[in-house]
Image (spheres, grey):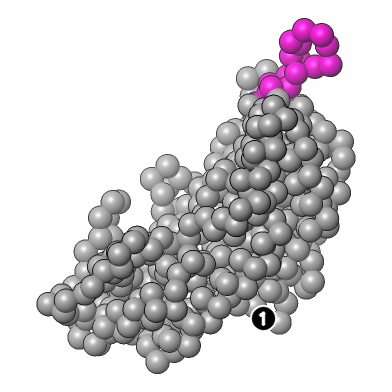
Amino acid sequence: MFNKDVKIKPFDNKLWLASPTMHGDELRYMQEAYETNWMSTVGANINEIERITCEKIGCGDAVALSSGTAALHLAVKLAGERLYGQPAAGRGTLEGRRVFCSDMTFDATVNPVAYEGGELVFIDTEYDTWNMDPAALEKAFEIYPEVRLVVFAHLYGTPAKIDKIRAICDRHGALIVEDAAESLGASYKGKQTGAFGDYNAISFNGNKIITGSSGGMLLTDDKDAANKARKWSTQSREDADWYQHEELGYNYRMSNVIAGVVRGQYPHLEEHIAAKKAIYERYREGLRDLPLQMNPLDGENSEPNYWLSCAIVDKEAMCRQVRGEKDALYTPEKGKSCPTEILEAISLLNAEGRPIWKPMHMQPIYRMNAFITANGNGRARSNAYIEETGLTDVGTDIFERGLCLPSDNKMTEEQQNAIIEIIHMCFE
């Protein structure tokens, strides 16, 4: 229980959850775009970061786009067209088709399925990685054997159990869209994330491990698919002297200026990962005597990029916490705490933490969609039900007990020690 009478000296400047770390070359490449007048969606910066990405990740082709969400949308659209053919005018490539999706993730992972008219079926999370549970995925195929597309994410930079997910999908003839937006630079059994799906996406959003302020990429080994995505991303303009359009297109291509920022960031990817790993290790050491655990690492099979350091409070150490749609309440209790109390305490330092991603099956927009757990069909359960029976799905449980800690790689050790100290105070 945090003693609110304790005087806390806040940091002079706001400590963000994860903000961009710039190095100088970004400005040089942006200036180059300006001086050569390549300010639009073509230019040397775009060509170079597409080349670097293919080399880094080991994919055949990379298409630079305006955002990770745009990359996911075109990945889902490519998968739908490959599976079901080109749709009729005004209809999506997945119109009326079920698609299995990660449940505990940011909604950008799953929204593209809705863009294309698909029916989202959410797959529960596992404790081992906080990613899609292969056992729940297998159960989902038992319930809906007709499904042919799976969309999954690597949460907070930790790879999912890709080999198990791939084996299940191959057995059922399903394609994979891999959302590696949070996991650039992470690897699974020596292979970079973003190279495992049929169509994959990464992000250069402002808070990612490297950034362009915005931007993302579609990754694939299918050159024809990459060229199709490039065409779609420039309003599907046909090869004619005038503006000729024979299919639906989008304004999704990355700017050469944004690509200049990404180009200047790429040489520092490993440096950023090392800094994030050091932050994670300091939290793990500094909090090891408290009744909470850090977000899991599958050290035997994968190397994460440590994008965000997270923690989950032990069940027996949770004080009572109730969350509505937009607000949360908790009852302080000696020797116990909860994410809401810890985040409030951290904010007193002028630092930013956040709750874990709220699972998609709990979101009002998707509350009526099917949701599959390892034991079969499941729905979000009320707090009263959980207290009475002790039963819940994994995603709901992690959301209730978990939080994201300040993970900015410009954070000093003194700042991190202050955060660790104030978390200790929450359990006094």
- Is residue 240 found inside the magenta-colored segment of the image? yes
Magenta-tinted stretch:
235-250
Q: Is residue 86 left or right of residue 321?
A: right
- Farthest front residue? 35
Q: Nearer the viewer, residue 138 or 317?
A: 317
Residue 249, given in percent of the width and then of the height, sits at 68, 23
Disc 1 designates what residue? Answer: 299
Q: Is residue 424 left or right of residue 256?
A: left
Residue 50 appears in the rendering: yes
Which residue shows up at 41% across the image and 49% down it? 363
Secondary structure under tag 1 reads loop
Residue 341, given in percent of the width and then of the height, sits at 26, 71
Residue 400, given in percent of the width and then of the height, sits at 37, 67
Which residue shows up at 25% across the image and 55% down it? 327
Q: Is residue 383 left or right of residue 80?
A: left
Q: Is residue 227 above or below residue 197?
A: above
Marks counted in the figure total 1
Q: Is residue 82 left or right of residue 411?
A: right
Q: Amino acid at mark 1?
A: Gly
- Farthest top residue? 242
Q: Nearer the viewer, residue 55 or 28?
A: 28
Q: What secondary structure is the stretch in magenta mostly built from?
A: loop
Which residue shows up at 49% across the image and 82% down it? 282
Residue 189, given in percent of the width and then of the height, sits at 78, 73
Residue 370 appears in the rendering: no
Q: Give the quarter of the image for residue 33.
A: top right
Q: Is residue 106 above or below residue 112?
A: below
